[in-house]
Image (cartoon, rainbow, N blue to C red):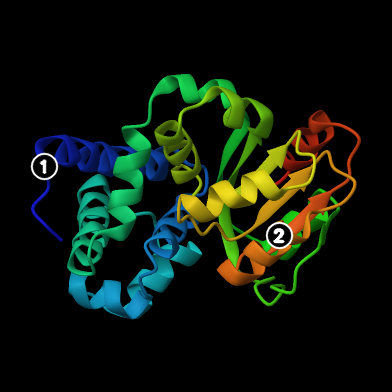
Amino acid sequence: MDELTDENSIAKDKLVRDIAGEIVTSDSPEKVIKKWRNIFKISQKNLANELGITSSVVSDYESGRRKSPGIKVIKKYINTLISIDMKRGGNVIKTFVKHDSSSRPLSNAIIDIKEFSSGISIYDFCKQINATFVTKNNQKLNQKIYGYTIIDSLKAITELSFSELIKLYGMTTQRAMIFTKVSTGKTPMVAVKVTNLHPPIIVLHGLNMVDEIAKRIADAEGIPLTVCRFDSVDKIVENLQKLDH
């Protein structure tokens, strides 16, 4: 990864503070520690080697068998995650830098957004909102997601510029994307393809039939596509707010 620019370096430092703050203030710090290791897609063994400790110590921290480490250890843990990611090309860091630089007006297109303290399987997520699969990519039911973003599809597509759309979709890495107010599903799926985003799952709401092109895009991109037939968006929000409690 190229040397970070001043702007990216600031965003990286903010990410370190945000992760540390989430761990320290959480009622279940062990879950948050494990969540971030999974987000960075780093094995316990790899992390332990970089930290100079054994895998069992990392496992003890993540299971709660060992008392949560102090702030100095937490900062070292976070910086090690980032260091490993940078050696791999910095893809995770770049995602969060993009998120941090996103403009605030995008919130007008976001109906609801939430982070999970620990990963939730795609299966459990879909079960919570009674979402059914419409594509063949259903082999990832056990894959973990770490949050969701509910998007007013009509507002996002009609009111935002292309660059703003990219920023909006870029916020959902390793998060479920839920598009509301869609008629066929084709437009949001085309937008996802153009922005080269690969969320773990996409949920469409507010439609009767899914366009075949939308299905083909989802299959080609390897993204599970589902449909939620709840009567209202409020019902989706209500059910999802119960997750991770």
Q: Position of residue 172 (x, y in %)?
A: 51, 46
- Quarter holding the C terminus is top right
| Residue 110: quarter of image | top right
Looking at the image, which residue is at 72% across and 62% down? 215
Q: Three-letter amino acid code at disc 1?
A: Thr
Seen from the viewer's position, the closer of residues 43 and 25 is 43
Q: Which residue is mark 1?
A: 5
- Identify the residue under disc 2: 213
- Residue 158 position within the rendered picture, expressed as x and y whole percent measured from the top left: 60, 26
Label 1, secondary structure: give it: loop
Q: Is residue 118 visible?
A: no
Q: Relative to residue 74, is residue 235 depicted above or below?
A: above
Labels 1 & 2 near each other (Cβ < 8 A): no
What amino acid is found at the position of numbered circle 2 in the picture?
Ile
Task: Give the image quarter of residue 53.
Answer: bottom left
Q: Nearer the viewer, residue 64 or 104?
A: 104
Please tell me which residue lies in front, 15 or 148.
148
**In this picture, residue 136 sits left or right of residue 172:** right
Residue drawn at x 41%, y 56% is 36
The quarter of the picture where the N terminus appears is bottom left
Q: In 3D space, how far apart are the residues under numbered discs 1 and 2 (Cα atoms)?
A: 40 Å
Whichever of labels 1 and 2 marks the residue nearer the N terminus, that label is 1
Q: How many marks?
A: 2
